[in-house]
Structure formats: C-alpha cells, structure tokens
Image (spheres, rainbow, N blue to C red):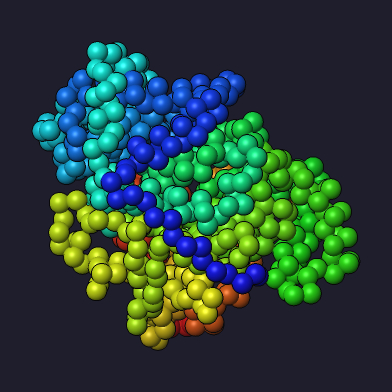
Amino acid sequence: MDEFSAPRIIDVDPLDNLNDLFASRVAAGPDQPMVEVKSGPGAPWKTLTAREVDADVVSVAKGLVALGIQPGEHVGIMSRTRYEWTLLDWATWAAGAVPVPLYETSSAEQVQWILSDAGVRLLVVESPAHAATVEEVRAQAPELGQVFVIDDGGIAALKEAGKDVSDDEIARRRGLANLADVATIIYTSGTTGRPKGAELTHENFYSLTVNAVKALPEVFAEANGRTLLFMPLAHVFARFIGVLVVAGGTVLGHTPDTKTLLEDLGEFKPTYILSVPRVFEKVYNSSEQKAAAGGKVKIFHWAAATAIAYSRALDDPKGPGIGLKLQHKVADALVYKKLRAALGGQTKWAVSGGAPLGERLGHFYRGIGVRILEGYGLTETTAPTSVNRPTATKIGTVGPQLPGCGARIAEDGEILLKGHHVFRGYHNNPQATQDAFVDGWFRTGDLGSLDADGFLRITGRKKEIIVTAGGKNVAPAVLEDRIRAHALVSQCVVVGDGQPFIGALMTIDPEGLPGWLAMHGKEPMTVEAAAIDVDVLAALDTAVDRANKAVSRAESIRKFTILTTDFTVENGYLTPSLKVKRNVVLQDFSVEVDAIYAGAAAH
C-alpha cells in the first residue's frame, strides 16, 4: 500500500446550493451525455444530454410551482429506481422545495408516518398500486394535496400544469437556498422503532460529493465514465450517487429490477459500480454455478484461489512471484475475462458500502481486475465518511476519512464522526438529535478501530453485541458475513445472549439453491426438503467451520438451525436497505432459538 495523505478539502461558497452544482455540470458540456434511459426490458438505451436533462428539470419544476408548492415545502417521491426519480429530485430543488423519499415497499402505516411527520404537500408515486396504499391513509395525512402517478402520465401532467410559469421564476427559486438549508429528509429504515427523519443539508451533499470526486480521481478520470444505479433511491447511498455523478461529470443509468441487473450491466457497460456486498456475492455465486453447469467447477475454484493469492501477494513488498503471475495470466484467459464481462466488461472500479464486504471477496475481485473500494457511512453522514482509495487500499478496512470528515473512537469502542457531511438533526425530534451527539461528535452506534495510517475498521454494532453466559462479548457481524457468503445461504442471525454458547439461525437462498444442487449432481428440491437434506447440512456445517476460523473458540458457532422462511422486506424481517431486523427475528423465532439451547448443559 502506498503512503496515504489526504487531499485538502475543497471549500464551497456558503451561498451556493445543489442547483449551482447542477448548473456547473450543464455549463461544462451542455451537449455531452448526462443520463441514459431505458423505457423497458429489451428496449434500447437512449442518451439525454445535459441540456435536455436541464430542460426536463425546469419543466417539472414549473409544474410544482404552478401547483402551489412554496420554497421550503416538502414533496414526496415513492418509486423504484428510474430516471423519473432523479428528475423529480432535481426538479424539486429547482422549485426551491425539499424532496422526501418513501420506499416503494413501504406499508400503509409507514407511508402515513412519513407523510404526516414530514408534512408532505404533494406526492409523486410510481404506480396505481402505490397510489392505492396512499389512499388508505390519506385521511391521516392532512397536509397532503395532489398525488401524481408516474405510470399514469404523472410527469407529463406536471409539465402541462407548469407551462405558463416563467423561466425567471425557476431561476429565482433555484437561487433561494444556501448551503445550510435542508436539501432532503431521509427516514432511516431503522431496525427498531419508528423511522427518524434525518435532515440533510445542501452542504452535506454538495461539499461531500465534490470532495469525494477529488479523493478518487482515478474513478472519475476514466474516458466516458458511467455508472448504473440499481439501489433504491429512497436510500441515502443511491441519493448520494445521484449527486455524485453530477459533480463527477459521468453518465448515469437506472435499473429498477435487480432480476435483470446482470443483463442491464452487460448492455450499459458501466466503468464504475456502487453497490452493497450482496450484489458482489451474487455475481460470484452465479458465476460459480454457471461453471459447474458447464462441467468446469474445478477450473473456477482454481482460478478463484489464484485470484485471491495474487491479490494478497500485491500487498507484499516482493509482489507476486513468476509462477503465480503465470497462473494468473492463464486464469484470466479462462475465467476472469468472463467474470468482468458479467459486469459489463468495462468496470474497473466498484465502491461497496452498506455492510461489510469480507476480505475473501475483496481479494477475489481485485485479483480478477475489478478493484472494490470498500467504504462506510450512514444516513446521518450523507452516505460515505470513509473509503479506500485506488492508491491506498487496505482490504478488510473501510479506508481513511474523506476530506473534511473526522473520526475518533470513544472509550467504549464506538465510532464518532464530525464534519461537513454530518446531518443537521432529526426532523421534529429534538430529543433524538440531542442523544445522537456527544461534545459535537455524532455517535454512529458502530464499533471500530483506527490504525496508525488513519484507516477505519468496523468490528460490529454497539446494540448487537451478544454477551454469553460466560461473559464473553461477541460481535455477530464477523460470523454472519462469512456465512452469508455461501451460495446456499440467504441470511444468518447469530444468537446467544445470556446463553452458554453461540448459535445461529440461517435461511436458504431460493435463488442459489437450484444452482448449488445442480453443481453437486443432486435432483431439484424445495427449500423445505433442502433444510433436512444430509448434503445441504454438511455444506452448511463446512460454511460454519470456515466462519469459526475468524473468531476464538468462545465466540464460535456450536449449533445452528435452518429456517424455511427467508427474510425479506415484504415479510417485515429486512429493512428496505436489506438489513435484518434482529429484534423481530428473535421475537418471532424464539421457539427455534430456545430449541438450540435445549439440553445446553451438555455443551
């Protein structure tokens, strides 16, 4: 690793706002591509220039003004990831208003809470089904006016409503906010309790994105730089990317359905990807299964081991030896080229956040020629606070802080953050805001350590620490992440609070199961049958043994149970950002947890 020195912070004019950032991008290349749009599965990608996107933004902003939206008022957006979402974001800012995202998977109760707590005045939803959810609770959202449906011509209706509003009025509205003003309220999907609305300012987004571009020049210097956005835009990471592409001068594409993700990546050919680890795991697992189906699983495993060994050797001052270099070259021709093609063939860089990636996957991808830069952040820090750099990477860490971002570790190991990226506070919740800070530092709730070079390592969640009957403190994330990397596993929840040993609940991945069975010469079977199959249980035993190597004996998993119900957003066991609601799982599967410890005295 090269010696790391943080670039100096780029200061932004306090009187500016996100509209100024957008205007700079348009002025820099009005006829350059800014967005590519796909009208549906199988349709071609159509290019929109910066000038065309700006015209679209102004037209929709005029509609919001015509419908009575005043500066500072709140406009709700409830949709999957698509161009219209990004358009509405910038149009709301152009109207001087504040966009408030809602997950399209939200229940009526969650929709009602956000609409009423944020006082949303106008709402744009994707489909008639979303509109129906809103109608269920409209009576409890007194400030809500009109609801527009994207799939029913909602964007065209907004443009039509605003056709008599002058360009001068939009120009005036675009200049109203300054850096200190609220740009958006993002409701944390929270694993417990009611979501809290984090108020993020224009400074949070503007300053953080221009400094992130400066900190990662290699990613943004690629000719024809482009990225495909597939995470939900109600999530802070995706919203940050929506601004980052404007600051970085790169082209943005959207895809609403992860089922067509590999196909869309192949067509769009991004130069960089920003994602959560689950996507990188799935690309690995599906590639392994394809190799097995073609009778080449041994070659795949050899190539994967070579990639990991090669990447590890890059961290050694001596570098990879001649033999390893030769093996790596052969593996590239046989396997790595195909894997890079699965990501579109042009992807050199990826940024992973939202959950730990795991060192094995980090080394694997670097070994095949895709550098995953792992980062870390929260809703309250406008997404990233730290990220590994192309010239300064330590796999297994989340990198050094971005310019203008500060971190320190409290006495109890909690990570504390400070800087231009930290939110203003929780909407309508002064008590929660007060509790979130100590001496001006934001309390993340995460545990970690900083090394001598300033690289941050995450070790777990403060609230999730399990204390066994023997008094051993166990951070479940280390074990859960390793087990979840197995092709058969969808989710894993480590248990053992107050118990004599550590156990785990696991769910089988219904998408990964057929490929795994075929790879091992087994007949297709249901998840229920797999949960009691001898070979499946043996494979999961091996996965647990492998995970246990990362921890001490007192922290290792001794027993596990397979649940036949997977955890999804729809059944309430995952948050919209795909984090397990641990408390709900432990409550609903308490019988299964108790069964792990029945007769525990024997252990």
Which image quarter holds the N terminus? bottom right
On the image, which quarter does residue 417 sit in? bottom left
Identified at 81% across, 46% down, the residue is: 295
Q: Residue at x 85, y 55 (%)?
A: 329
Q: Nearer the viewer, residue 142 or 488?
A: 142
Whole-percent x and y of residue 202?
Answer: 31, 47
Name the residue: 25% across, 30% down.
172
Identify which residue, 405 or 237, lies in the foreground. 405
Which percent across, then down, holds residue 398? 51, 65
Going 34% across and 24% down the picture, which residue do you hit? 58
Image quadrant assignment for residue 304: bottom right
Reply above or below: 591 against 129. Answer: below
For the residue pair 381 and 152, the one nearer the viewer reads as 381
Q: Is residue 132 left or right of residue 68?
A: right
The spot of residue 195 in percent (x, y) is 25, 51
The mark tally for this picture is 0
> In the rendered image of this protein, does residue 289 appear above or below residue 321?
above
- Where's residue 592, x and y in %? 40, 63
Asked if residue 421 can be seen in this view, the reply is: yes
Left-right relation of 69 to 88: left
Residue 496 shows in the view: no
Q: Looking at the image, is 396 positioned above or below residue 38?
A: below
The correct choice, above or below, for 220 with respect to 496 in the image is above
